[in-house]
Image: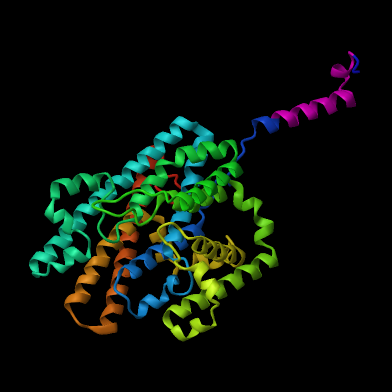
Amino acid sequence: MSSIADPIAGSPAADAKTEVKAEAEAKVAAPAITLPAIGERELRLDLFRGLALWLIFIDHLPPSLLTWFTIRNYGFSDATEIFIFISGYTAAFVYGRAMLESGVVIATARILRRVWQIYVAHVFLFTIFLAEISYVATRFENPLYTEEMGIMDFLKQPDVTIVQALLLRFRPVNMDVLPLYIVLMLALPLILWSMKWRPDVTLGLSVLLYAVTWEYDLYLSAYPNGFWAFNPFAWQLLFVFGAWCALGGARRMSRILSSRVTMWLAIAYLVASFYVTLTWYVPQLSQFMPKLVEQWMYPINKTDLDVLRFTHFLALAALTVRFLPRDWPGLKSPWLRPLILCGQHSLEIFCLGVFLAFAGHFVLAEVSGGAALHALISVCGILIMCGMAWIISWYKHSADKGASKKGAAGNADLAGGGA
């Protein structure tokens, strides 16, 4: 029992009680999520998002020699997993901080503004894409372009199709990623609010939704038939996992990621997946694959984010984090600057890449130039994307400099997500 002199004299008993009380208050006040301190932007994210944009562009072109440089030929996952994971990570980094500092309402308003920007970009891209395909098909009297690019229904019923396009239910070929991103960003306020409460529980609920999607075949329907090429109920797992990593999950996993056991398991899985992909191109190798394994494994579903694809991405990410530290000097190299710039302006460069992919597809279909022409078109497309990223970066830098002179806030989006 403390005496009346304890608070006056600062006795050990009083000090101990004060420390216990302070610790208890700190535990109550501390948020469940943790964010990195404000500093230099994470260039690794920009680097790999830029790489994903380049790979998506090359994959959207007809197959050729350069296609063998994309990761989809060496394992189960491809550039889409990289793009969605980094999108979840950067979105949580930017808007999670806004939610902690400004509250749920302000953060939600900022997220909805970003969703609107992405939606407008999607509608603009849809319009330009339709005009591009329709002009080429009419000018060169080749209706196969409209069928191949999936706009035949638009030409038959433009009034109905436009409404379905605005509802994200009708999309030409290669325009499936942005609608997925829009839906995931719409769910971001709920995801961040839940992670502010219990991040691990939120990730667990995401896994549960993923499992329910596979068990009960949940999906969103598309127009005029079928379903979304990327099922949001399944792909949300990768997005939420990226957000969970950004809000302290990666830091808590640091011991697991640095373990040699994790490293060798990741390497073994990547080697095994590489062998499986080889059997797709060299059928003779499939005789060494056990039939039970083939029956269990196939089909490897991209629409619903097959668990083999998700695990393949995790293995790649684990090795990347281990062997590519944040302070790697190569991130400052001028040779990687084009990739990083493309990653920092992902929305604009993605839209440009979709437009360029059809332009390249058209040139390759009309001119028989072989592998040399295909390589030239691929390189030119990447150079155009890099040039556009440099122009956007230069403009934003000039605008931010002008805003700072006037006392206005510049672009504080460290994650490159366009807050």
Q: Please give left or right for residue 395 compared with residue 205 in the image.
A: left
Instruction: Tell me the quadrant of the picture where the C terminus can be found.
Output: top left
Q: Residue furthest bottom?
A: 284
Q: Is residue 419 visible?
A: no
Q: Please give left or right for residue 8 compared with residue 240 in the image.
A: right
Q: Is residue 32 visible?
A: yes
Quadrant in the rendering for residue 387 = bottom left
Q: Magenta part of the protein: which range?
A: 4-25
Q: Residue furthest top?
A: 4
- Residue displayed at 41% across by 50% down: 232
- Residue displayed at 46% across by 62% down: 48
Vertical arrangement, residue 207 with respect to residue 374, above or below:
above
Instruction: Tell me the quadrant of the picture where the N terminus can be found.
Output: top right
Q: Nearest the camera: 92 or 134?
A: 134
Quadrant in the rendering for residue 107 = top left
Vertical arrangement, residue 238 with respect to residue 94, above or below:
below
